[in-house]
Amino acid sequence: MKHLTLPVHVFALFAVCYGQQHCCYPDQYDLRESETGWNYGPVGGVSSYRGSRHVVYDFVHKKLAIEERTDSGGVRQYYKMIYDYPEGAHYLIMGTDCFKTKLTGDMKQHCIPGQASHVGSYVYGAGDSGVLVDAFLFQVKGNVTSHREVTRAGCLPVRELHTHLEPDDKTISMQSFTYENVTTTVEDPSVFTPPVPPCPPRHQFTQDVQDPELLQWIEKTKREQRISDPPRL
Protein backbone atom coordinates (compact mmCIF):
# COMPACT_ATOMS: atom_id res chain seq x y z
CA MET A 1 0.00 0.00 0.00
CA LYS A 2 1.22 3.44 -0.91
CA HIS A 3 0.48 6.41 1.29
CA LEU A 4 0.93 10.05 0.38
CA THR A 5 0.75 12.99 2.77
CA LEU A 6 1.71 16.22 1.05
CA PRO A 7 2.79 19.44 2.76
CA VAL A 8 0.28 22.16 1.97
CA HIS A 9 2.15 25.38 2.67
CA VAL A 10 5.82 24.71 1.98
CA PHE A 11 7.19 23.56 -1.34
CA ALA A 12 10.27 24.04 -3.47
CA LEU A 13 9.86 24.63 -7.20
CA PHE A 14 12.28 23.38 -9.82
CA ALA A 15 12.00 23.12 -13.60
CA VAL A 16 11.94 19.41 -14.34
CA CYS A 17 10.58 18.72 -17.83
CA TYR A 18 11.73 15.23 -18.70
CA GLY A 19 9.89 11.94 -18.44
CA GLN A 20 6.39 13.36 -18.08
CA GLN A 21 3.60 11.17 -19.40
CA HIS A 22 -0.16 10.78 -19.31
CA CYS A 23 -1.21 8.29 -16.67
CA CYS A 24 -4.17 6.75 -14.85
CA TYR A 25 -4.91 6.94 -11.15
CA PRO A 26 -4.55 3.69 -9.16
CA ASP A 27 -7.37 1.16 -9.60
CA GLN A 28 -8.21 1.70 -5.93
CA TYR A 29 -7.71 4.79 -3.83
CA ASP A 30 -9.00 6.47 -0.69
CA LEU A 31 -8.42 10.21 -0.19
CA ARG A 32 -9.50 13.37 1.57
CA GLU A 33 -10.31 16.35 -0.60
CA SER A 34 -10.56 20.02 0.40
CA GLU A 35 -12.50 22.27 -1.97
CA THR A 36 -12.90 26.03 -2.26
CA GLY A 37 -15.17 27.60 -4.86
CA TRP A 38 -15.87 31.09 -6.13
CA ASN A 39 -18.62 32.38 -8.42
CA TYR A 40 -18.94 35.81 -10.00
CA GLY A 41 -21.70 37.22 -12.19
CA PRO A 42 -23.19 40.61 -13.01
CA VAL A 43 -26.48 39.62 -11.35
CA GLY A 44 -25.51 37.61 -8.29
CA GLY A 45 -22.18 39.28 -7.59
CA VAL A 46 -19.53 37.28 -5.77
CA SER A 47 -20.22 34.14 -3.73
CA SER A 48 -17.97 31.47 -2.29
CA TYR A 49 -18.10 28.18 -0.46
CA ARG A 50 -15.83 25.66 1.24
CA GLY A 51 -16.21 21.93 1.42
CA SER A 52 -14.52 18.65 2.16
CA ARG A 53 -14.97 15.19 0.68
CA HIS A 54 -14.02 11.67 1.53
CA VAL A 55 -13.67 9.79 -1.77
CA VAL A 56 -13.27 6.02 -2.09
CA TYR A 57 -12.74 4.73 -5.63
CA ASP A 58 -12.69 1.05 -6.56
CA PHE A 59 -12.22 0.36 -10.27
CA VAL A 60 -11.61 -3.34 -9.53
CA HIS A 61 -15.16 -3.86 -8.23
CA LYS A 62 -16.62 -0.87 -10.15
CA LYS A 63 -17.83 1.16 -7.17
CA LEU A 64 -17.45 4.75 -5.95
CA ALA A 65 -18.45 6.42 -2.68
CA ILE A 66 -18.36 10.14 -1.92
CA GLU A 67 -19.17 11.81 1.39
CA GLU A 68 -19.31 15.59 1.24
CA ARG A 69 -19.68 18.45 3.71
CA THR A 70 -20.03 22.04 2.52
CA ASP A 71 -20.38 25.47 4.09
CA SER A 72 -21.84 28.23 1.93
CA GLY A 73 -22.81 31.48 3.61
CA GLY A 74 -23.15 29.75 6.96
CA VAL A 75 -25.39 27.02 5.52
CA ARG A 76 -23.85 23.63 6.24
CA GLN A 77 -24.76 20.54 4.27
CA TYR A 78 -23.92 16.86 4.36
CA TYR A 79 -24.68 14.20 1.80
CA LYS A 80 -23.33 10.90 0.56
CA MET A 81 -23.40 9.28 -2.88
CA ILE A 82 -22.80 5.64 -3.76
CA TYR A 83 -22.24 4.52 -7.36
CA ASP A 84 -22.68 0.76 -7.72
CA TYR A 85 -22.09 -0.13 -11.37
CA PRO A 86 -22.59 -3.93 -11.07
CA GLU A 87 -26.02 -3.29 -9.50
CA GLY A 88 -26.74 -0.42 -11.89
CA ALA A 89 -27.75 1.80 -9.00
CA HIS A 90 -26.90 5.26 -7.67
CA TYR A 91 -27.76 6.20 -4.08
CA LEU A 92 -28.00 9.73 -2.72
CA ILE A 93 -28.37 10.20 1.05
CA MET A 94 -29.35 13.65 2.32
CA GLY A 95 -30.50 14.20 5.86
CA THR A 96 -33.02 11.49 6.63
CA ASP A 97 -33.87 11.11 2.94
CA CYS A 98 -32.52 8.44 0.62
CA PHE A 99 -32.89 8.47 -3.16
CA LYS A 100 -32.13 5.63 -5.57
CA THR A 101 -31.73 6.20 -9.31
CA LYS A 102 -30.66 4.11 -12.28
CA LEU A 103 -26.97 3.96 -13.18
CA THR A 104 -26.14 3.01 -16.75
CA GLY A 105 -22.96 2.61 -18.75
CA ASP A 106 -19.53 1.44 -17.66
CA MET A 107 -17.43 2.94 -14.90
CA LYS A 108 -14.66 5.04 -16.39
CA GLN A 109 -11.08 4.78 -15.23
CA HIS A 110 -9.78 8.03 -13.78
CA CYS A 111 -6.94 9.15 -16.09
CA ILE A 112 -5.17 12.19 -17.43
CA PRO A 113 -6.86 12.49 -20.85
CA GLY A 114 -4.85 11.98 -23.99
CA GLN A 115 -5.49 15.52 -25.22
CA ALA A 116 -4.06 17.08 -22.04
CA SER A 117 -1.01 19.32 -22.46
CA HIS A 118 1.90 18.95 -20.06
CA VAL A 119 2.57 22.44 -18.70
CA GLY A 120 5.40 21.80 -16.25
CA SER A 121 6.87 19.71 -13.46
CA TYR A 122 8.08 20.57 -9.98
CA VAL A 123 9.17 19.09 -6.69
CA TYR A 124 6.47 19.46 -4.03
CA GLY A 125 7.99 19.57 -0.56
CA ALA A 126 11.55 19.98 0.61
CA GLY A 127 14.53 17.72 1.20
CA ASP A 128 13.95 13.98 1.30
CA SER A 129 10.17 14.46 1.52
CA GLY A 130 9.98 16.19 -1.87
CA VAL A 131 7.71 14.56 -4.45
CA LEU A 132 8.03 15.03 -8.22
CA VAL A 133 4.75 16.32 -9.65
CA ASP A 134 3.54 16.81 -13.24
CA ALA A 135 0.94 19.43 -14.18
CA PHE A 136 -1.49 19.07 -17.10
CA LEU A 137 -4.01 21.41 -18.75
CA PHE A 138 -7.08 20.31 -20.72
CA GLN A 139 -10.69 21.09 -21.57
CA VAL A 140 -13.23 19.01 -19.65
CA LYS A 141 -16.45 19.85 -21.46
CA GLY A 142 -18.02 22.99 -22.79
CA ASN A 143 -16.23 26.01 -21.34
CA VAL A 144 -14.54 24.20 -18.44
CA THR A 145 -10.74 24.19 -18.25
CA SER A 146 -8.96 21.85 -15.84
CA HIS A 147 -5.44 22.20 -14.43
CA ARG A 148 -4.54 18.89 -12.79
CA GLU A 149 -1.40 17.91 -10.89
CA VAL A 150 -0.35 14.30 -10.21
CA THR A 151 2.75 12.64 -8.82
CA ARG A 152 5.23 11.27 -11.35
CA ALA A 153 5.46 8.03 -9.34
CA GLY A 154 2.09 6.31 -9.01
CA CYS A 155 -0.07 9.03 -10.65
CA LEU A 156 -1.55 10.12 -7.30
CA PRO A 157 -3.68 13.29 -7.33
CA VAL A 158 -2.16 16.38 -5.70
CA ARG A 159 -4.15 19.47 -6.71
CA GLU A 160 -6.71 20.53 -9.29
CA LEU A 161 -8.25 23.79 -10.51
CA HIS A 162 -11.41 24.07 -12.64
CA THR A 163 -12.34 27.32 -14.40
CA HIS A 164 -15.75 27.70 -16.03
CA LEU A 165 -16.64 30.66 -18.24
CA GLU A 166 -20.28 31.06 -19.23
CA PRO A 167 -20.54 33.67 -22.02
CA ASP A 168 -24.36 33.72 -22.13
CA ASP A 169 -24.85 35.17 -18.64
CA LYS A 170 -21.26 36.47 -18.30
CA THR A 171 -20.43 34.45 -15.21
CA ILE A 172 -17.20 32.81 -14.12
CA SER A 173 -16.72 30.09 -11.53
CA MET A 174 -13.58 28.50 -10.11
CA GLN A 175 -13.09 25.37 -8.03
CA SER A 176 -9.83 24.58 -6.27
CA PHE A 177 -9.14 21.07 -4.91
CA THR A 178 -6.33 19.82 -2.67
CA TYR A 179 -5.90 16.09 -2.04
CA GLU A 180 -4.39 14.63 1.12
CA ASN A 181 -3.97 11.29 2.90
CA VAL A 182 -4.08 9.40 -0.39
CA THR A 183 -3.85 5.61 -0.05
CA THR A 184 -3.96 3.05 -2.85
CA THR A 185 -6.39 0.64 -1.24
CA VAL A 186 -9.99 0.45 -0.03
CA GLU A 187 -9.58 0.21 3.72
CA ASP A 188 -13.30 0.05 4.56
CA PRO A 189 -15.51 -1.61 1.89
CA SER A 190 -18.60 -0.84 3.98
CA VAL A 191 -18.60 2.67 2.49
CA PHE A 192 -20.24 1.07 -0.57
CA THR A 193 -23.06 -0.54 1.44
CA PRO A 194 -26.51 0.84 0.47
CA PRO A 195 -28.66 2.39 3.20
CA VAL A 196 -30.51 0.11 5.61
CA PRO A 197 -33.49 0.21 5.50
CA PRO A 198 -33.54 0.79 1.72
CA CYS A 199 -34.73 3.97 0.09
CA PRO A 200 -38.54 4.31 0.27
CA PRO A 201 -40.44 3.41 -2.94
CA ARG A 202 -41.40 7.06 -3.57
CA HIS A 203 -37.69 7.89 -3.73
CA GLN A 204 -36.75 5.15 -6.20
CA PHE A 205 -36.57 6.51 -9.73
CA THR A 206 -36.31 4.74 -13.07
CA GLN A 207 -34.44 7.64 -14.70
CA ASP A 208 -30.71 7.53 -15.15
CA VAL A 209 -28.75 9.57 -12.61
CA GLN A 210 -27.55 11.83 -15.47
CA ASP A 211 -31.10 12.72 -16.59
CA PRO A 212 -31.14 16.58 -16.77
CA GLU A 213 -34.51 17.02 -15.06
CA LEU A 214 -33.59 14.58 -12.31
CA LEU A 215 -30.23 16.31 -11.77
CA GLN A 216 -31.99 19.66 -11.50
CA TRP A 217 -34.43 18.28 -8.95
CA ILE A 218 -31.62 16.68 -6.94
CA GLU A 219 -29.61 19.93 -6.87
CA LYS A 220 -32.71 21.84 -5.70
CA THR A 221 -33.32 19.31 -2.95
CA LYS A 222 -29.68 19.48 -1.85
CA ARG A 223 -29.84 23.28 -1.57
CA GLU A 224 -32.89 23.00 0.65
CA GLN A 225 -31.11 20.73 3.12
CA ARG A 226 -29.71 22.21 6.33
CA ILE A 227 -27.78 19.26 7.70
CA SER A 228 -24.55 19.72 9.65
CA ASP A 229 -23.86 16.11 10.61
CA PRO A 230 -24.25 12.70 8.99
CA PRO A 231 -27.81 11.38 9.40
CA ARG A 232 -28.58 8.33 11.45
CA LEU A 233 -30.47 6.14 9.00
Image (cartoon, helix red, strand yellow):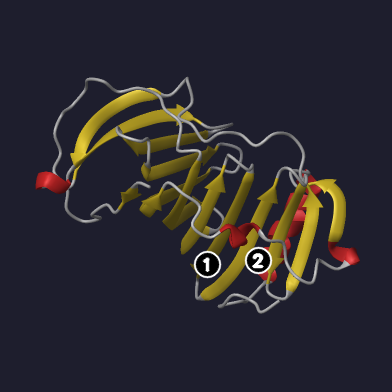
Tell me which corner region of the image, top left, top right, bottom left or bottom right, holds residue 93: bottom right
Q: State the quadrant of the C terminus.
A: bottom right
Q: Nearest the camera: 110 or 63?
A: 63
Q: Is residue 11 left or right of residue 214?
A: left
Instruction: Give the amino acid type for the residue marked by disc 1 in the picture.
Output: Arg
Name the residue tied to disc 2: 223
Q: Residue at x 69, y 58 (%)?
A: 219
Asked if the residues shown at circle 1 and circle 2 are in contact, with their CB atoms under 8 angstroms apart, the answer is no
Relative to 84, say whether 141 is above or below: above
Query: Looking at this rendering, what residue extends furthest in the left direction?
Result: 127
Q: Which mark is residue 191?
A: none
Instruction: Give the amino acid type for the residue marked by disc 2 in the picture.
Output: Arg
Q: Residues within 10 Å of mark 1 (few under 14, many from 20)?
A: many
Asked whether the viewer can see residue 169, the reply is yes
Asked whether the viewer can see residue 46, the reply is no
Q: Secondary structure at mark 2?
A: helix
Q: Residues within 10 Å of mark 2 (few under 14, many from 20)?
A: few
Q: Secondary structure at mark 1?
A: strand
Q: Residue at x 63, y 47 (%)?
A: 63
Relative to 49, say whether 18 is above or below: above
Q: Nearer the viewer, mark 1 or mark 2?
A: 1
Tell me which corner region of the image, top left, top right, bottom left or bottom right, holds residue 20: top left
> Can you give x and y, in whole percent of width and height, for residue 54 in the image?
49, 59
Name the residue tied to disc 1: 69
> Can you give x and y, in whole percent of width and height, for residue 68 in the image?
54, 63
Query: N-terminal of the two: label 1 or label 2?
Result: 1
> Can you give x and y, in whole percent of width and height, for residue 95 in the image?
68, 74
